[in-house]
Amino acid sequence: VLIKQGAVELVVPGNLPIGCSTLYLTVFRSANPLDYDPLTGCLIKFNEFAVYYNSYLQDALQKLRRQQPQAKIIYADYYNSAMGFFRNPPIF
């Protein structure tokens, strides 16, 4: 819709690492330590879902780029950007 209305540059954000969200960590708390990433303390299954979703989103954006070559469609990788904070909190 935006491209049809004349947009020529779009930024599409990917999903954040939702398994690191305090909401998810609280609501989906687990007694099983294997549910958590030992490096980050994030819930593994939710971050795996975010990676899965982001992969499909990037595939859809590639298809859209082929269909709309006049538009500049940028994928914003929020997941990997945010994971830097969770993997190395002391440097931030």
Image (cartoon, rainbow, N blue to C red):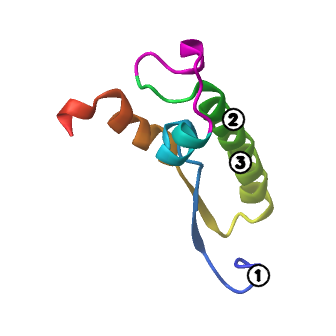
Dot 2 falls on a residue whose secondary structure is helix
Mark 2 or 3, nearer chain start: 2
* Rendered location of residue 50, percent (x, y): 64, 39
Relative to 87, say whether 2 is above or below. below
Viewer-nearest residue: 83 or 59: 83
Q: From the viewer's perspective, is the residue at label 2 or at label 3 nearer?
A: 2
Amino acid beneath label 2: Phe
If the image is split into quadrants, where does the N terminus sit?
bottom right
Whether 29 is among the magenta residues is yes
Picture quadrant of residue 5: bottom right
Q: Is residue 79 above or below residue 70?
A: above
User: What is the number of the mark on residue 4?
Assistant: 1
Image point (66%, 28%), residue name: 45
Category of crowding for the residue at label 1, using alpha-carbon neighbours closer than 10 angstroms: few (below 14), some (14–19), many (at least 20)? few
The amino acid sitting under disc 1 is Lys
Residue 26 relative to residue 45: left or right: left
Image quadrant assignment for residue 68:
bottom right
Q: Which residues are magenta?
A: 28-39
Q: Secondary structure at mark 1?
A: loop
Q: Position of residue 24 (x, y in %)?
A: 57, 42
| Residue drawn at x 59%, y 48% as measured from the top left | 15
Residue denoted by label 3: 57
- Relative to 27, residue 89 above or below: above
For the view shown, which residue lies furthest in the left direction?
91
